[in-house]
Amino acid sequence: MKSKAVVYRADGGAVKVEDIVVHAPGPHEVMIKVGACGVCHSDLSVTNGTLPLPAPVILGHEGAGVVCQVGEGVTELKVGDTVISCFVNSCGACRYCASGKPNLCDTGNTTPYTLPGGKPRTFDENGKPLNAMGGCGVMAEYATLHKNNVIQVAAGVPLDRCALIGCGVMTGWGAACNTAKVEPGSICVVFGAGGVGLSVIQGCQNAGATMIVAVDMLASKLELARTFGATHVLDASESENVVKALRKLTGGGADYAFECVGHGEIVAQAYGCLRKGGTAVVVGLAGPADITTLKTASFALEEKTLKGSYYGSTRPRHDFPRLLGLYQAGKLKLDELITRRYRIDEAPQAFDDLANGRNARGVIVFE
């Protein structure tokens, strides 16, 4: 199948839109006709080296579409099913899957840029293989994925909204509701008001938090955060001591703090703004060399918790339909999260807008 795709070649340049060939699905695989793909910060992280994947690689892991071909042994999906891509391949059998943590599946750890087994399904015009980000590579008109990398959802919700569930919304909302398990009446602080941070805010609101403070350095992002449920905002660029300002604003410290930027210094701020017994959750993806420094004694003396959240601690087959249900019930904002829609030929502009903080979420739409 011929297709256009957004490819990063690690040549120091911008992403490129190329004509590729997508092979038919093999055993336990499906091909989907992609309807929309979010332009996520993790895609940008591939291009700047924060997330080092071997190039050339087809970007895109936050997509939604319709199954157009099924491979041998696929019984749970059929042509015409609406699906959302899931960049963690969950085997269902390892210790993590068996204990309700499929986001940490061992199989997922072995497929960051290929399908299971490593056999490529995508090739450039010269017949050379292309890697696929997260085993997905859905920033393309067509993509072949393993059946465990797609989650079937009910038809009816526009595909550009469905796509957001595949990463940003799940990662943020899940950090609040699955990882932290925010309790009603809590005080929460969210560092970073991009697509993931706004989804954390929504998760905190859904969980019943009564005070939600958004922290960012862009006034436009802070204004947007209010529309997503933030009760207070703090412009970090105008504060000499962010931790001190937050502790004063929250009356002694937050119950929960979420770091959605991916920077060690901000992780320390999230931990520092907590009250005794509070929990800080690291959501943002930091670079391989990034380090966080904390006072060791505070762990024992103040009983604070510092924990990570990968993919919102999701159980995709449970959480994806659940989030779409919240959207349909008017309890989750997805329409408002999309700042701009792009054609695939506008992908370089979409990445530039992302790098410069112009969007809450940009989405490439194929239909």
Image: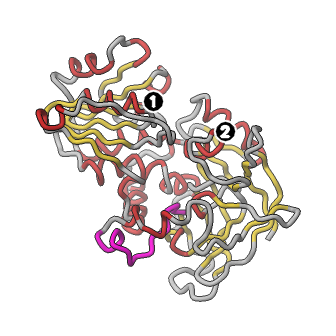
Q: Residue drawn at (61%, 60%), measured in percent from left and top? A: 113
Residue located 27% across and 41% down the image:
306
Q: Quadrant of the C terminus?
A: bottom right
Q: Nearer the viewer, residue 68 or 293?
A: 293
Lateral position of residue 57 relative to residue 39, left or right: right
Residue at 75% x, 49% y is 9
In whole angstroms, how far apart are the C-alphas of marks 2 and 1? Answer: 20 Å
In this picture, is 77 found above or below 172?
Answer: below
Amino acid residing under circle 2: Phe
The quarter holding residue 294 reads: top left
Q: Nearer the viewer, mark 2 or mark 1?
A: 2
Q: Which residue is mark 1?
A: 224
- Which circle's residue, 2 or 1, is located before the other in the chain? 1
Q: Secondary structure at mark 1?
A: helix
Please give the range of residues in magenta.
Answer: 85-99
**To which residue does mark 2 refer?**
351
Residue beneath the point at 34% across and 35% down: 229
Left or right of residue 366, residue 53 in this image? left
Magenta segment: does it hold 354? no
How is the protein colored in the picture?
A: secondary structure
